């Protein structure tokens, strides 16, 4: 509280937006490895103007891209807004017009206009840098300059923020939920974009219910669609109740099909209510599909269907097994780690294949009922079962750590981890570089920001030269 006015948690501390677009050369301590050349692109919500809705939700702010370019031992930083039609309209008016999840609060000027934000993930595929949000089509930015280029029309609608790029074929495999004419429908799209950027298929199917399906799983031959009981309901919203809510009375379903098959062949596996924002990876093994996922007992960040507050439950790494050659539709579940965390990443040259090394942000002091505070960077070696961690000092918090291989043909895990962290005491950010297989020894280089980079969602490393392809 400030005075008697409740402070929106997503507008304070390092959730608060920065409103300048800057270019900085960062001060480096330690040594930037010779082979680390390219750009770490990160993205997150950063509302251009103060939101209309007093209950502004973190997921609904305008996207801002933060690019850290590593070249010749120097690190430079650039940030730019993603100038969606919503951003342009509000920019012209000099104030917020759209109201995120609660569109009943929209300004009349927003009526019938595109409300798109692109704030969740930034992915480079087929020469395009795509700013992604699961409720809107991909929005293209220019590599390097971060100029906004606009929606990519080929996708014909919304697309997940978590597509998977097949390392063998170069295809981008994706989905979208809540598609079609009815708001918050149970229809889901399955899509594939070729290695050259051509959308090859977009096929719709009916899920058991409308789930806020943030991410999915892809193996060499299969695709898996998790339908988790964080539900969307337009009818509920019309009654003044939460449009998106946790409904643990419903089961968890995962639809499994071969990637090259028709969507009519989907087989639904099930387990009890749980929530997953982010899987680590999935693969095929001995006639089964195995998936490692950060699993919550209940979905955090959203209320219950009756409007009562949700719980901040913790996520840990669990392993799901699907017996695709057997007759049981039950998902076998087992915990494989005991540290609370989120934002798992791995060496994405192993996407859809068995993998050894995973990394994630962790909370070593997690308290039930409190939001996750990622004070630690963790590395898990699936072969040895060994976990190593680097705990940040002084209340500092990390973003998602991103892996970069030492070279295109380096062994799995041989490379670096980069993470943007918030220095709580100084209210400022640093970019840390770790030896990916030895995070415990601490950063081997630090690039200091003169200001904060607000907490965001996801990022990706793009090697030098990729931007030249367009
Ligand atoms: Fe995500």
Image (spheres, rainbow, N blue to C red):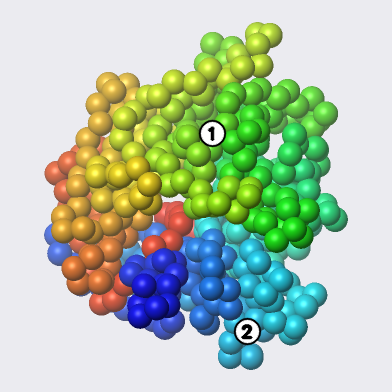
Label tally: 2
**Of labels 2 and 1, the one closer to you:** 1
User: Label 2 neighbourhood size at 10 Å, few (<14), some (14-19), many (20+)?
Assistant: some
- Residue 146 seen anywhere in this rendered image of the structure: no
Q: Is residue 449 left or right of residue 86?
A: left
Instruction: Tell me where residue 84 appears, x and y as whole percent.
Output: 64, 74
Q: Residue at x 60, y 14 (%)?
A: 323
Instruction: Kindly identify which residue carries mark 2.
Output: 90
**Where 138 falls versus 253 (above or below)?**
below
Q: At x 27% / y 67%, what residue is drawn?
A: 429
Instruction: Give the residue at x 46% y 55%.
Output: 458
59 lies above or below 313: below
Q: Where, quadrant-wise, is the C terminus in this rendering?
A: bottom right
Q: Earlier in the sequence, mark 2 or mark 1?
A: 2
**Where is residue 406 drawn, in percent x and y?**
32, 45
Q: Quadrant of residue 13?
A: bottom left
The CB of the residue at mark 1 lies under 8 Å from ligand 1: no
* Residue at the (63%, 72%) spot, across then down: 99
Q: Position of residue 218 (x, y in %)?
A: 59, 33
In the rendered view, tell whether residue 330 sits above or below residue 154: above
**Farthest residue, direction top:** 326
Q: Which residue is mark 1?
A: 274
Quick one: SS at disc 2? helix
Neighbourhood count class around disc 1 (C-alpha, 10 Å): few under 14, some 14–19, many 20 upward: many
**Is residue 204 found left or right of 415 in the rendered image?**
right
Quarter containing the N terminus = bottom left
Give x and y (percent) for residue 394: 16, 58
């Amino acid at each position: 509280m400030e005075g008697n006015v409740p402070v929106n948690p997503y507008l304070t501390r390092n959730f608060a937006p920065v409103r300048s677009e800057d270019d900085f050369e960062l001060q480096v301590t330690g040594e930037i490895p010779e082979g680390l050349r390219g750009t770490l692109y990160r993205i997150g919500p950063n509302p251009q103007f103060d939101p209309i809705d007093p209950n502004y939700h973190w997921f609904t702010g305008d996207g801002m891209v933060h690019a850290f370019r590593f070249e010749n031992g120097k690190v430079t930083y650039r940030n730019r807004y993603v100038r969606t039609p919503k951003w342009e309209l509000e920019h012209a008016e000099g104030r917020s017009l759209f109201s995120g999840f609660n569109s009943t609060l929209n300004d009349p000027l927003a009526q019938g206009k595109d409300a798109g934000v692109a704030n969740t993930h930034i992915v480079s595929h087929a020469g395009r840098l795509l700013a992604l949000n699961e409720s809107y089509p991909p929005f293209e930015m220019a590599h390097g300059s971060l100029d906004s280029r606009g929606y990519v029309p080929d996708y014909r609608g919304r697309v997940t923020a978590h597509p998977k790029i097949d390392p063998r074929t170069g295809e981008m495999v994706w989905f979208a939920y809540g598609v079609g004419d009815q708001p918050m429908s149970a229809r889901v799209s399955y899509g594939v974009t070729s290695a050259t950027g051509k959308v090859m298929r977009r096929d719709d199917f009916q899920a058991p219910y409308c789930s806020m399906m943030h991410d999915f799983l892809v193996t060499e031959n299969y695709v898996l669609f998790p339908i988790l009981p964080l539900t969307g309901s337009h009818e509920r919203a019309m009654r003044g109740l939460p449009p998106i809510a946790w409904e643990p009375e419903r089961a968890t379903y995962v639809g499994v099909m071969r990637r090259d098959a028709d969507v009519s062949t989907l087989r639904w596996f099930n387990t009890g209510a749980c929530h997953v924002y982010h899987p680590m990876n999935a693969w095929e093994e001995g006639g089964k599909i195995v998936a490692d996922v950060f699993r919550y007992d209940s979905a955090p960040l959203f209320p219950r269907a009756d409007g009562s507050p949700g719980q901040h439950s913790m996520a840990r790494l669990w392993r799901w097994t699907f017996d695709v050659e057997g007759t049981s539709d039950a998902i076998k579940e087992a915990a494989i780690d005991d540290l609370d965390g989120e934002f798992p990443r791995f060496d994405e040259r192993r996407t859809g294949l068995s993998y050894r090394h995973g990394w994630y942000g962790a909370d070593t002091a997690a308290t039930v009922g409190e939001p996750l505070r990622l004070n630690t960077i963790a590395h898990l070696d699936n072969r040895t079962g060994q976990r190593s961690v680097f705990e940040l000092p002084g209340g500092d918090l990390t973003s998602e750590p991103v892996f970069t291989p030492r070279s295109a043909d380096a062994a799995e895990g041989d490379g670096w981890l980069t993470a943007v962290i918030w220095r709580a005491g100084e209210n400022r950010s640093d970019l840390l570089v770790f030896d990916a297989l030895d995070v415990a020894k601490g950063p081997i280089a630090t690039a200091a920001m003169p200001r904060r980079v607000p907490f965001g969602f996801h990022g990706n490393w793009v090697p030098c030269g990729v931007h030249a392809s367009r």
